[in-house]
Image (cartoon, helix red, strand yellow):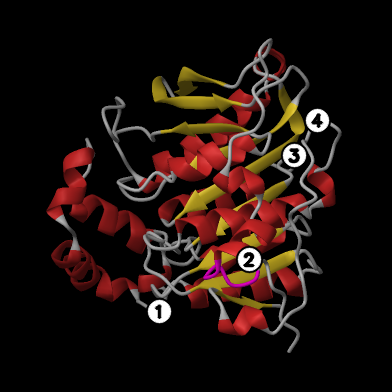
């Protein structure tokens, strides 16, 4: 099987310098007239305000823009990735879902999925696109864990989204996919037993039981691969770790390929669910892949000639295993 190397091994500093996007490890030249900046943001969603930040890239021309969705409940927000993306010339919107981290309203999986659609609508509105130099034709959705499922959903719901990156994506309904209605009470009890009480300290208006009920009741339609028909042929990068998320991402990949998508790629990185000891590798993989997507290219992107994707057996022996 053909293997695609996103980057070579990151073990040697010389290789890191040669093949890692510069935005991962170094700051760009400052733009004195139009510097990069951070804007405190409140995005309206179903009567509440989603609090967060909009990382604005330097310059005045419209920028490709990423919506970055965190996982459950969001201890790891991947804001180092947001900074690297901004250095690469992307705006990045990162907010919290309703009922999480002090945002008013009740948290639920359904609300989080709705919030993601609200974020797309907000950032692509003519008023905000003009105000924040957003190129509404180059919107990328990136999500980690639950955020990966949310990003897939919003990509499926919004045809104007150009591409998606799913990092160790959850598949909310998968754990109950084979269960029958008679199994409901036992399945929800199992969900509650496995819940971490600490995670719910960041959430309001919810409980392990309510999320278990929601997961069970949507067990068939909330399989990750079900988004394939609506995502269609748009570019999708699937990144997984040694965390059990690989099979669900691979199922989505195969479903996309059956629909004629030749722009989906699955990259495996040998690390934990939070990519704790492979943050640079994660950023390099994403930025390298984004640079290769024709739909995202425009003159407003800075030079990224140092990024390359190569055919090389080192993909097997280094930090990445890249399945095509």
Query: Residue 43: horizontal and vertical position, in percent?
Result: 48, 22
Tell me the residue that label 4 is attached to.
300
**Spatial separation of the CA atoms under disc 4 and disc 1:** 48 Å
**Tag 4 secondary structure:** loop
Quarter holding residue 192? bottom left
Instruction: Kindly report which numbered mark, 4 or 3, lies closer to the viewer in this rendering.
Output: 4
Q: Is residue 11 above or below residue 91?
A: below
243 or 127: nearer the viewer: 243
CA separation in Å, label 4 and label 2: 28 Å
Tell me: 14 left or right of 243: right
Eyeballing the image, is 221 above or below 64? below
Which mark's residue is nearer the viewer, 4 or 2? 2
Residue under label 3, please give it: 160
Task: Tell me the distance, in whole angstroms, between the alpha carbons under discs 3 and 2.
Answer: 37 Å
Q: Earlier in the sequence, mark 2 or mark 1?
A: 2
Sort mark 4 into few (<14), some (14-19) or many (20+) by Cα contacts within 10 Å: some
Residue at the (33%, 50%) spot, across then down: 72
Give the magenta range: 8-12
User: What is the spatial separation of the Cα atoms under label 2 and label 1, in whole angstroms?
Assistant: 46 Å
């Amino acid at each position: 099987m053909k293997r695609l190397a996103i980057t070579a091994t990151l073990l040697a500093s010389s290789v890191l310098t040669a093949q890692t996007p510069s935005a991962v490890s170094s700051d760009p030249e400052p733009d004195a007239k139009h510097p990069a900046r951070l804007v405190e943001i409140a995005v309206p969603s179903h009567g509440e305000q989603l609090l967060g930040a909009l990382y604005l890239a330097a310059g005045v021309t419209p920028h490709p823009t990423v919506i970055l969705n965190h996982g459950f409940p969001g201890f790891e927000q991947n804001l180092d990735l947001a900074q690297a993306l901004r250095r690469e010339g992307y705006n990045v919107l990162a907010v919290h879902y309703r009922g999480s981290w002090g945002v008013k309203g009740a948290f639920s999986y359904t609300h989080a999925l709705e919030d993601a659609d609200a974020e797309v609508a907000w950032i692509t509105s003519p008023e905000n696109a003009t105000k924040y130099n957003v190129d509404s034709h180059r919107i990328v959705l990136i999500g980690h864990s639950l955020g990966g499922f949310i990003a897939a959903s919003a990509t499926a719901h919004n045809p104007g989204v150009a591409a998606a990156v799913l990092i160790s994506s959850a598949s909310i309904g998968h754990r109950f996919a084979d269960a029958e209605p008679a199994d409901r009470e036992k399945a929800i009890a199992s969900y509650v037993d496995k819940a971490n009480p600490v995670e719910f300290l960041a959430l309001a208006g919810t409980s392990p039981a309510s999320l278990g009920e929601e997961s069970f009741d949507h067990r068939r339609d909330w399989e990750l691969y079900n988004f394939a028909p609506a995502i269609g042929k748009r570019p999708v990068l699937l990144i997984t770790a040694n965390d059990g998320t690989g099979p669900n991402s691979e199922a989505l990949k195969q479903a996309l390929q059956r629909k004629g998508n030749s722009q989906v790629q699955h990259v495996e990185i040998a690390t934990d669910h939070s990519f704790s000891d492979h943050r640079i590798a994660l950023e390099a993989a994403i930025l390298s892949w984004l640079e290769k997507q024709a739909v995202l290219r425009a003159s407003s992107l800075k030079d990224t000639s140092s990024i390359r994707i190569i055919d090389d057996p080192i993909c097997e022996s280094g930090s990445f295993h890249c399945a095509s």
